[in-house]
Image (tube, helix red, strand yellow):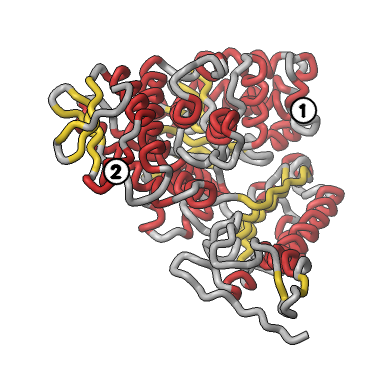
Amino acid sequence: MANHSKTPPRAASSVALTDVRRRPALWARAQLLAQDTAEGPDGLAHTPSTVLRGDLAQGRLDYGPPIAVIDIGSNSVRLVVYEGLTRSPTPIFNEKVLCGLGREVQSTGLLAADAVEKALAALRRFRTLCDRIEVPQLLVIATAACRDATNGRAFVDEAERVCRTKIELISGKREAELSALGVVSGFHRPDGIVGDLGGGSLELTDIHGVRVKPGVTLPLGGLALQDVSAKSVKKAEKIVKKALGGARLLEAGAGRTFYAIGGTWRALARLHMWQTGYPLHVMHGYVIPAREALDFSGLVHRVNPETLSQIEVVADARRPLLSYAALVLEHLVRLARPKDIVISALGVREGLLFSLLTEEERRKDPLIAAASELNLLRSRSPAHGQELITWTDRFIASSGLDETAEERRLRHAACLLADIGWRAHPDYRGEQSLNIIANAAFVAIDHPGRTFLALAVFFRHVGLVDEELSPRLRELASTRVLDRARVLGAALRVAYLVSASTPGVLPRTPMLVERGRLVLRFDESLKSLAGERVFVRLRQLARLIGREPVMDAGNVPITVAGS
């Protein structure tokens, strides 16, 4: 049969066939669709309506080829493949293997033979995975164990043959810098001391915004302490006290934030999260007040970890190192006297990617970038999400409602996320949107901020009632956060009913507070959109802000039933 099919013409925002062939995952989907091709009565090849078209939903954004990082650490070897090199990189594959390369380095000076074998096996798997995913750029770094061990260089040489790429054996200062850049990339205007606790070392760095001061490295990793102390926590405590006592940069930590990076510190925080019944199981941005962290870490390193409540939430392989991680944290809190401990899920790998970005890309807000991506992938009209920002900007400016710069930033993110749940059943759109947003892999946002975003979009779908809202999630929201989420949710309800999520309507239907009235003003050509349900929603918002609702067109009031 002759092939009469043609590649669809490329639209301004579409993906042509050649683009798809450069995207393995998308090309595979196209091939599967092609298998459903059938011959029609006219003798031509016919495919389902979802066949490859310019508007076919991709599921992944086209940021060019994926990029991967392998981090050969003292305890684990990890591969993360990212969708692309962006301000808010999204992992498309993430795997770690606990190899324990550094478990004997302090006592023997060598990487253990079985650990080397396990690490090389992991690297072979990772290299094959990168080949299958078609990763053109693989970055590999090796840290404390490899730089400290006598046979570290020989292992790196063999690892380079396996990975088929150059491995950067980073110094302690370079590791401290990359860890700090990971925090810079993952927090909005960070300020404090960054601590990255690995298996072999602890890196400490002072940061303020994008400024990163030179850091220090200390041999206080969990495996290193376990090794040099012969598994004696008492001996390890003496080592920790002595090493941290000489870290002068800790003197600058008083009253600031201590950003904690590292798998064992995350495990410690997870244990704290579950013991306290914290309602949001998102590790990045999790806050433990300094006093509480001091008491909790002191308890953990003084008892057998297996006897701790909720210990099952910590992986078996991590439990033997909990005491050492807790010991280091306790003495850091005593010396630095921070106001709180904040967990960072971003570290060396993300710092490395951040260092490769252009200055323009670095200046972008990663929260807005991530929200924009979800808006593009899941909303009915991404342009409408952008219009919502301008529409609510004008409303807030005219309303007299107090709004900080951070609250404005969060409102903009909420506008971009407001329609991501539209494909769900109407009865569950609010709940589904709340769960997606509250647990999304966002960075540069704290947990109360997540709660605001989730609640605003929840209210946009279910109305301004609280019956369906989890009381545990409400614990994270202050009265101000809850009130502002209701106001924004009510405004979004007006906007979506007026526009049906189509672009071009909101710029012609501004909603402003004028002389004590909340006015929804319609362009003359759109005044037929001013229905009864629109007025009901406008009235709900007006009651929240203490204004009288009015709809007009050309300064002439529009009267509808119920007004």
Whole-percent x, y for residue 488 in the image = 37, 29
Quadrant in the picture for residue 256: top left
Who's the residue at 48% across and 59% down the image? 356
> Whole-percent x and y of residue 423?
58, 42
Look at discs 1 and 2 and give the one toward the viewer: 2
Q: Quadrant of residue 498?
A: top left
Q: Tell me the element at label 1.
A: helix
- Give the amino acid type for the residue marked by disc 2 in the picture: Thr
Q: Position of residue 311 (x, y in %)?
A: 75, 20
Of mark 1 and mark 2, the one earlier in the sequence is 1
| Quarter of the image with the N terminus in it | bottom right
Q: Are marks 1 and 2 in contact (CB under 8 Å)?
A: no
Horizontal and vertical percent position of residue 195: 53, 35
Q: Residue furthest bottom?
A: 2
User: 36 or 448, which lies in front?
Assistant: 36
**Residue 130 position (above or below residue 435):** below
Dot 2 alpha-carbon crowd within 10 angstroms: few under 14, some 14 to 19, many 20 or more? some
The residue closer to the viewer here, 307 or 468, is 468
Can residue 510 be seen in the rendering of this structure? yes
544 w.r.t. 441: above or below? above
> Badge 1 is on which residue?
320
C-alpha gap between disc 1 and disc 2 = 53 Å
| Residue 549 relative to residue 242: left or right | left
Q: Is residue 486 left or right of residue 427?
A: left
Between 546 and 536, the one nearer to me in the picture: 536
Q: Judge left or right: residue 563 versus residue 477.
A: left
